[in-house]
Image: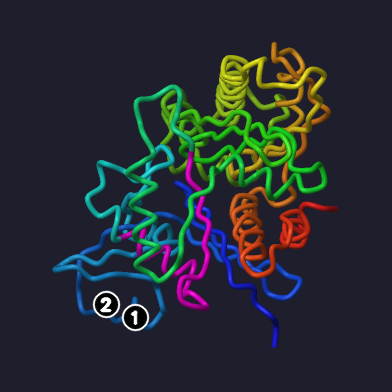
Amino acid sequence: MKHTDMAKGLDVGTMNILSGRQEGAETVFVQQRNSFVEIEYSDMAEQMLSRSEVLHIRKDDKVYVVGDDALNFANIFNKETRRPMQHGILSSEEASAIPMIKLITEQVVGEPSKPNERLFYSSPADPIDSPLTTLYHEKTLESMLGDMGYDPEPINEGMAVIYSELADNNFTGLGISFGAGMTNVCLAYYAVPVMKFSIARGGDWVDEQTAQATGTPVDKVTSIKEDDFELDFRTDVGGVEGALAIYYENLLDYVIENISREVDEEDVEEGLDVPVVVTGGTSSPNGFEDLFADHLADANIPFSISGVRSADEPMYSVASGALVAARSEEGEDDSGAAEEPAAEEAAPESED
């Protein structure tokens, strides 16, 4: 039998919810789309859903199809998918947000493997360009996970990237998670965060701006972007891909502008030279890190950058880092073991 560690990592994202757990030498990830669609209840629909093991909840005369299946059903019934989260946190405009996110999260993390199993879940930093605050989101998730039988602990999303990707650099560097709802930035020095913040722009912002500029439905823009869009700037001007490239570039400049504004020269060691790791679904297009490296080279920031790289598995990076943090703490609880060895074991995908 495979030995399973008693700890889990959870990435609660606007677009996807993912969990990571260690089984033997492997990290096992489970993923669901963080969305749902509402369809009219009928006996036929209920039978069809139950037979095909589609995730759903029935409430009065409505059926909610949740997770990955929501997108397929939205297309079949010509409906819009809805999301429990917006701008990286629980949506204040969606009355069903909490029951929906609970159902998806239960599917993704499963039952605790022991009472009060340690679980680190990602939480964004407060955005510096918006009045949004993440406290309600963080506390609601904490009590929801506690009700499921876990011992939950929030971990900053940017810090999770550093745990996942920079074990080989003593957890020193700049981790940036480009999510759908937000972009999270964290500069850490030997696993201690020196600066962390988020901005309320991410992949959704790029999609919305592109949709507006080109008169294309947002869902269509998202699927073009997720399909095989590349940031090579040879795209035709006027098309959706041309507009995506323009707004991607604008997003990167905006992130860099905020980094140079937020980083305090007094907190940074003189001569600091750090790697930058970019991750998150929005950083997936080919050419993303090259474009970011070009723009960073011209930026006015008080430390130098030794290189920009993408996480090997951008989708899994935050869940993996949350797992590293949870396991290192479990290790300390069990044996007083140091943090680094546990961290390196748990992030095999970041070491090649």
Residue 64, above or below 133: below
Residue 105: quadrant of the picture: bottom left
- Alpha-carbon neighbours of circle 2 within 10 Å: few (<14), some, or many (≥20)? some
Q: 324 and 35: which one is in front? A: 324
Compared with 328, 4 (above or below) is: below
Residue most extreme to the bottom: 1
Three-letter code, disc 2: Glu
What SS does tag 1 mark?
A: helix
Q: Nearer the viewer, residue 304 or 282?
A: 304
For residue 285, above or below residue 35: above
Residue 51's spot in the image, x, y percent?
37, 83
| Residue that appears at 70% across and 21% down | 268
User: Mark 1, residues whose alpha carbon is within 10 Å: few (<14), some, or many (≥20)?
Assistant: few
User: On the picture, is 318 further left or further right than 106?
Assistant: right
Residue at the spot 73% in from the left edge and 70% down from the top edge: 26
Expressed as whole percent of the image width and height from the top left, the position of residue 269 reads 75, 21
Q: Which mark is residue 264?
A: none
Q: Which residues are magenta?
A: 100-124
Residue occupied by mark 1: 50
Q: Please give the residue where the numbered disc 2 appears in the rendered image.
A: 46
